[in-house]
Image: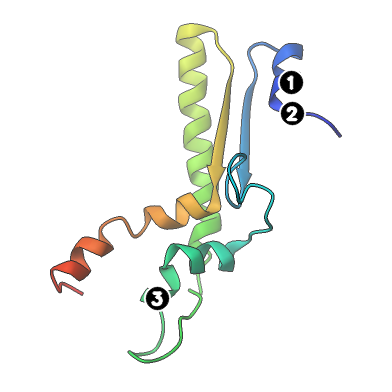
């Protein structure tokens, strides 16, 4: 439709735009197709699920990547609304499925390093 943040911001200078995509709006993977299982696999999340050691990576039964991306988008929209109340400035919120998936495993590298897993 040709509606992007720049155009919408010109029409409504107080707009809050929330975008949820696989890899974000910018960067080398921005145009690549992504869905829950891709983000979970690329984040390393599938390496923590499975029946036992030696089994192939397994997709988690609960779509936590989709749920958390929506929650992050809603939370960021609330922050943007609060910011707009203070500054009267528009904002674009950009949430990536991969970023949301990676956020769940922030401490796992440290735990693996110290053999806590």
- Please name the residue shown 38% across and 52% down the image: 103
Query: Which scheme is used to colour this image of the protein?
Result: rainbow
For marks 2 and 1, give the CA distance: 6 Å
Badge 2 element: loop
Indicate whether 43 appears above or below 96: below
**Which is nearer the eye, 56 or 18?**
56
**Image spot of residue 89 (x, y percent):** 55, 11
**Which is nearer the eye, 115 or 58?**
115
Q: Residues within 10 Å of mark 2 (few under 14, many from 20)?
A: few
Q: Name the quadrant of the N terminus.
A: top right
**Image spot of residue 65 (x, y percent):** 51, 58
Determine contact: label 2, label 1, CB under 8 Å. Answer: yes
Residue that sits furthest to the left in the current view: 114
Indicate whether 7 appears above or below 73: above
**Image spot of residue 90 (x, y percent):** 59, 16
- Please name the residue shown 55% across and 32% down the image: 93
Q: Which mark, residue 4?
A: 2
Badge 1 element: helix
Badge 3 element: helix
Tell me which numbered mark, 2 or 3, is placed earlier along the sequence: 2
Q: Residue under circle 1? A: 8
Indicate whether 56 appears above or below 92: below
Residue that sits furthest to the right in the current view: 1
**Image spot of residue 102 (x, y percent):** 41, 56
For marks 2 and 3, give the CA distance: 37 Å
Q: Residue under circle 3? A: 47
**Which is nearer the eye, 93 or 82?**
93
Q: Residues within 10 Å of mark 3 (few under 14, many from 20)?
A: some
Q: Residues within 10 Å of mark 1 (few under 14, many from 20)?
A: some
- Please name the residue shown 69% across and 58% down the image: 33
For marks 1 and 3, give the CA distance: 41 Å
19 sits to left or right of 62: right
């Amino acid at each position: 439709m040709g509606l992007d943040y720049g155009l919408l911001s010109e029409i409504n200078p107080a707009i809050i735009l929330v975008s949820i995509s696989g890899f974000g709006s910018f960067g080398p993977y921005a145009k690549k197709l992504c869905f829950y299982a891709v983000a979970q696999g690329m984040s390393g999340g599938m390496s923590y699920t499975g029946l036992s050691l030696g089994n192939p990576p397994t997709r988690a039964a609960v779509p936590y990547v989709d749920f958390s991306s929506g929650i992050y988008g809603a939370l960021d929209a609330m922050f943007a609304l609060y910011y707009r109340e203070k500054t009267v400035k528009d904002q674009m919120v950009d949430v990536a499925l991969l970023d949301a998936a990676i956020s769940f495993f922030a401490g796992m590298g440290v735990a693996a390093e110290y053999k806590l897993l």
